[in-house]
Image (cartoon, rainbow, N blue to C red):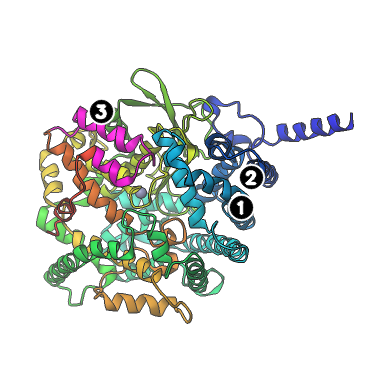
Amino acid sequence: MAKARKSAGEAGKREQNPLLAPWRTPFKAPPFGSIKPKHFKPAFGLALKTHKQEIAEIAAKTAKPTFANTIVALEKSGVLLGKIADVFFNAASADTNEALQAIERDISPVLAKHQSAILLNRRLFLRIADLYERREDLELEREDLRVLERTYKAFVRAGAKLDAKARKRISEINMELATLGTAFTQNVLADEQAWHMLLDGERDLEGLPESVRAAAAQAAVDLGKPGQYAITLARSSVEPFLQFSARRDLREEAWKAWIKRGELGGKTDNRKIVVEMMKLRSELARLLGFETFADYVLEDTMAKTPAGVRALLDKVWPAALRSARAERDALEKRARADGENFKIAAWDWRYYAEKERQARYDLDEGEVRSYLVLENVLEAAFDTAGKLFGIVFEERTDIPVYHPDVRAWEVRTKAGDHVGVFYGDYYARPSKRSGAWMSSYRGQHKLTGGIRPIVVNVMSVARGAPDTPTLLSFDDARTLFHELGHGLHGLLSDVTYPSLAMTNVLHDFVELPSQLYEHWLSRPEVLKRFALHEKTGKPMPERLLKQLEAARTFNQGFQTVEYTASTLLDLELHSLRDVSGLDADAFESEILARIGMPAEIVPRHRIPHFQHIIGGYAAGYYSYLWSEVMDADAFAAFTETGNIFDRKTANKLKTHIYSAGGRQDALDAYIAFRGRAPEIEGLLRKRGLS
Ligand SMILES: [Zn+2]
């Protein structure tokens, strides 16, 4: 009786916590409306306990290890924890608050410890290792063999082979890194929230086109200052301001605030945190038998070694530097022609680049924006997915969302089969981390029936004023396509095992589906149909299309230098053999001096706010460039047929890349699609650097 009463009580508690109760929503989407911060702690508690039990059972089995009783059992474990963590971390990134931030600080080290306890579980590892040794004799299907190999590798890379003392230390390091990483990210957000610049009257607005003014007016409304104009540190706010503002003093002020995120002194300063993290990462790498953290990370990538990354960067950097220097000279000339008599400073670059672009190509970014209505660009991205992969997006208002700005779509095949759920969350807000990303609420797999995914795209676009459409810069539109490319990599996934599904691929392969997808946006076939003027609805004129095409490689020296400098900072930082006495500022200056960084350009991300290298892109920021070699080469597979939607090529792309997750070795997957390994010429041509 007592026992029955207790379990009834627990079941009752479960029913009351929306994170634990069954989700009776369309497509079993998270019931966002009823989830409150207070629900996370008990839900995490139960989910961790459940997962621990599952793992303990697998490890304690006395029966000889089989693929089913060990690998499949592992793949099936942790479902509840994954579900709750997905809801939590998406909220912590896209719509956070003080309560969630406090939970994040508490739960991050707990989750890191939990993860370590699994990967460093001796008995569990011995079962996996036993299977791995016998893998050739197990008569496994190809994907089964792959998941066994990847699981073994993940355990070895986590330190499962090491002695008990080393394993204990690794677990401690992982917890400390999780705590530091959470602090780092929250500090950047705090610095972004703490700053905005109010523009007072026409004099402060000088040079800003209508669309930038409208966005600044809306930003002021969001800050509780209606009737005014505000610039924030969201990229979509500060970048257009730097591009158009004729007020050099205000540009300097905004630019300095932007590049100083994470190093303002005081409580939110990230420089000491970075040094601590580098020490821990370096120690971790050595424990695992690698000289540096970069050696460790890159061992499990397509690039394989730091030398492999440098070989690519060495081809790109000198060419980018040459282009950037020529661009700077042209900007200086432009400024002089305007009657100015100063050297171009970093806060001048975007402004004079815009003038130069207008003069050279007669291309006005403001005019381009007026043709890039968010709604239509989204339509274009969906339409492209339809043409390539035969799927349709149908908006649904009955699927719960986590913020009024979020929209939901059901994705189906043209025959009507359910593919997945897609959320789009496009507007900037103070509760959202800056940048753009794709994430998921449910992974795809076939272990317990055909489980279809729920994915989300998040961006930080400056919203248009009420009753006016939100306009995008060409860069924003490209980012929208980029993130939907990741989204499709998730939505189209068609593999058996969760750990091989969706974007679970080598990290220098993961940007291929996203960057490749950007190519379709730039094509006249797409722009002519979807780039419609915000007021007249008329398609982008031929003249503007031609100007866009002609200006395609304009300012690419700057962009490549900006990006590659961050890549080199990341690589060099994680290649340090001795991190004692590391000073983040001095290190950054030293590296930039060594590579000959032009004084007028600042790395796209400086170390104190370089969130990529705190999260999953440590020693991996080069991945974008690595993937770009493939995406430039992969898109050529379409243009070579004369049809950017060529059916046969699209089918191969879906089979080997977008639906294949990590089922296959990355290079093999590429070759299966393209018929050969990628060639770098496409990248250099695309950036106008060859
Ligand atoms: Zn990406």
Q: Residues within 10 Å of mark 2 (few under 14, many from 20)?
A: many
**Amino acid found under the numbered disc labelled 3:** Lys
Decide which of tag 1 and tag 3 comes sooner along the chain.
1
User: Tag 2, which secondary structure?
Assistant: helix
Q: Quadrant of the C terminus?
A: bottom left
| Residue bounds of the magenta highlight | 643-672
Most extreme residue toward the bottom is 581
Please name the residue that numbered disc 3 is placed on. 387
Q: Determine the image quadrant of residue 328.
A: bottom left
Please name the residue that numbered disc 1 is placed on. 121
Q: Position of residue 34 (x, y in %)?
A: 63, 35
Real-space CA distance between mark 2 and mark 3, rounded to the nearest whole angstrom: 47 Å
Please name the residue that numbered disc 2 is placed on. 59
Q: Position of residue 308 (x, y in %)?
A: 28, 62
**Amino acid found under the numbered disc labelled 2:** Ala
Whether residue 448 appears in this view of the structure is yes
Magenta span includes 546: no
Residue visible at 52% across and 40% down? 403
Real-space CA distance between mark 1 and mark 3, rounded to the nearest whole angstrom: 47 Å
